Image (spheres, grey):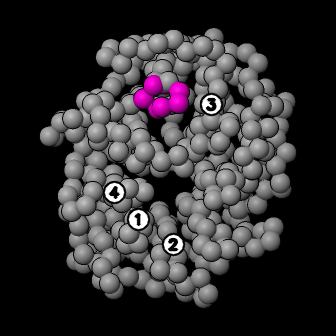
């Protein structure tokens, strides 16, 4: 089990972990789940005023009472979604759509010089501006009623904005970050000493604790507090995988009093805030393997299956969404669930591998 350095700061976690086994007999009892019609894969969970929307690969669902009600169905696969200017915005394989929450009638919007764009990134920044990334075309920012091109890199895989007003774009030739008027590029070759371990950036996963997780084809690294630490200090916390080699990470969230929760293809994995074993010192200047019993798998929550989307709302409730359904837990409810399912024995296999700590000067 490979991870990084020590609590409470991410760069201080240890690079080697053993996976713990969880007792399947103990199950949580959250409120009844919300079933997802058609068992479609979740894409985004959006809160707009008093309304809650679940966007799936082909549908826009609104939470109404105890049900998720479909209000729009897209023939083209939906890949990303956001709320902006009192409307719902959908990025599909065949273009950009704007939906009124009253009528749910789709309004297609064009991007400059792009016919039927394959929209792979869609988000608002801290200044209230809308950003759109189209694979094969680049990145655009909405200015007034039109879009202006900001980045010409063609291979766009995703994008997010962080609270420090930075915009981050995942591409197949590295990671791009805009802070103010300037773009900074991070890649494997370390252009201007801005280095990440892999050029193929597949996902950007911001958590609710101010950290940005950069998921690459061959590694995962973290910019702490929206990149402020990573940009200012000399090393960037980096791991090869979480859980097992090849394990896909879908989302990450921090639950106060419980720990850091990962939604993965392997299932839910929890890194508790309070480790049960003492943590030895780690010399940051060297690569080191340390077997530690920290990361534990959790059994599936009834009605949620294997969640692929995690979100923590303003009330500190944890939302877990998968094709089977959506489950909502309070922080206390999740802590009780995690405590009841605490592992009793450890796996005998040590899943260690070396980590890298990259210079960020």
- Mark 2 or 3: in front is 3
Residue at mark 1 to residue at mark 3: CA–CA distance: 29 Å
Q: Quadrant of residue 19?
A: top right
322 with respect to 215 (left or right)? right
Residue 38: x %, y % from top left:
69, 64
Q: Which residue is mark 4?
A: 166
Mark 1 and mark 3 in contact? Answer it, CB < 8 Å.
no
Mark 2 and mark 3 in contact? Answer it, CB < 8 Å.
no
Q: Quadrant of residue 128?
A: bottom left
- Residue at image coords 62%, 53%: 312
In this rendering, the count of numbered labels is 4
Residue 306: x %, y % from top left:
66, 44
Disc 2, SS: strand
Q: Earlier in the sequence, mark 1 or mark 3?
A: 1
Q: Earlier in the sequence, mark 2 or mark 3?
A: 2
Residue at mark 4 to residue at mark 3: CA–CA distance: 28 Å
Q: Which residue is mark 3?
A: 273
Residue 361: x %, y % from top left:
21, 35
Seen from the viewer's position, the closer of residues 305 and 164 is: 164
- Residue at image coords 40%, 48%: 226
Q: Earlier in the sequence, mark 2 or mark 1?
A: 2
Magenta stretch in the rendered image: 7-13
Q: Earlier in the sequence, mark 4 or mark 3?
A: 4
Q: Which residue is mark 2?
A: 83
Magenta stretch encompasses residue 24: no
Q: Which residue is mark 1?
A: 126
Packing grade of label 3 (10 A; few <14, some 14-19, many >=20) is some
Mark 2 and mark 4 in contact? Answer it, CB < 8 Å.
no
Whether residue 76 is visible to the viewer of this picture, yes or no, is no
- Mark 2 or 4: in front is 4
Packing grade of label 1 (10 A; few <14, some 14-19, many >=20) is few
- Residue at image coords 68%, 74%: 50
């Amino acid at each position: 089990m490979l991870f990084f350095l020590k609590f409470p700061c991410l760069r201080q976690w240890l690079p080697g972990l053993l996976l713990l086994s969880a007792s399947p007999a103990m199950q949580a009892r959250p409120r009844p789940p919300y079933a997802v019609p058609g068992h479609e894969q979740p894409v985004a969970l959006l809160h707009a005023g008093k309304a809650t929307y679940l966007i799936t690969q082909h549908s826009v669902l609104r939470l109404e009472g105890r049900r998720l009600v479909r209000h729009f169905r897209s023939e083209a696969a939906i890949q990303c979604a956001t709320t902006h200017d009192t409307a719902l915005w959908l990025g599909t394989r065949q273009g950009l759509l704007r939906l009124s929450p009253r009528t749910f009638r789709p309004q297609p919007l064009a991007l400059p010089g792009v016919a039927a764009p394959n929209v792979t990134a869609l988000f608002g920044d801290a200044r209230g501006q809308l950003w759109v990334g189209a694979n094969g075309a680049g990145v655009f920012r909405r200015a007034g009623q039109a879009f202006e091109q900001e980045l010409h890199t063609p291979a766009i895989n995703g994008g997010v904005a962080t609270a420090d007003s930075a915009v981050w774009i995942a591409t197949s030739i590295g990671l791009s970050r805009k802070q103010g008027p300037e773009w900074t590029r991070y890649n494997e070759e370390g252009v201007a000493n801005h280095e990440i371990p892999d050029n193929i950036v597949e996902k950007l996963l911001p958590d609710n604790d101010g950290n940005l997780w950069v998921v690459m084809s061959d590694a995962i690294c973290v910019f702490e507090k929206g990149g402020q630490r990573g940009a200012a200090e000399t090393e960037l916390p980096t791991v090869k995988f979480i859980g097992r080699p090849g394990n896909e990470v879908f989302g990450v969230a921090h639950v106060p009093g419980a720990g850091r929760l990962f939604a993965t293809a392997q299932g839910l994995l929890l890194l508790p805030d309070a480790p049960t074993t003492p943590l030895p010192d780690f010399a940051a200047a060297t690569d080191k393997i340390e077997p530690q019993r920290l990361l534990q798998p959790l059994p599936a929550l009834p009605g949620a299956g294997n969640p692929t989307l995690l979100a923590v709302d303003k009330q500190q409730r944890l939302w877990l969404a998968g094709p089977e359904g959506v489950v909502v837990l309070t922080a206390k409810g999740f802590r009780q669930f995690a405590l009841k399912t605490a592992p009793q024995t450890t796996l005998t296999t040590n899943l260690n591998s070396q980590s890298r700590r990259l210079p960020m000067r």
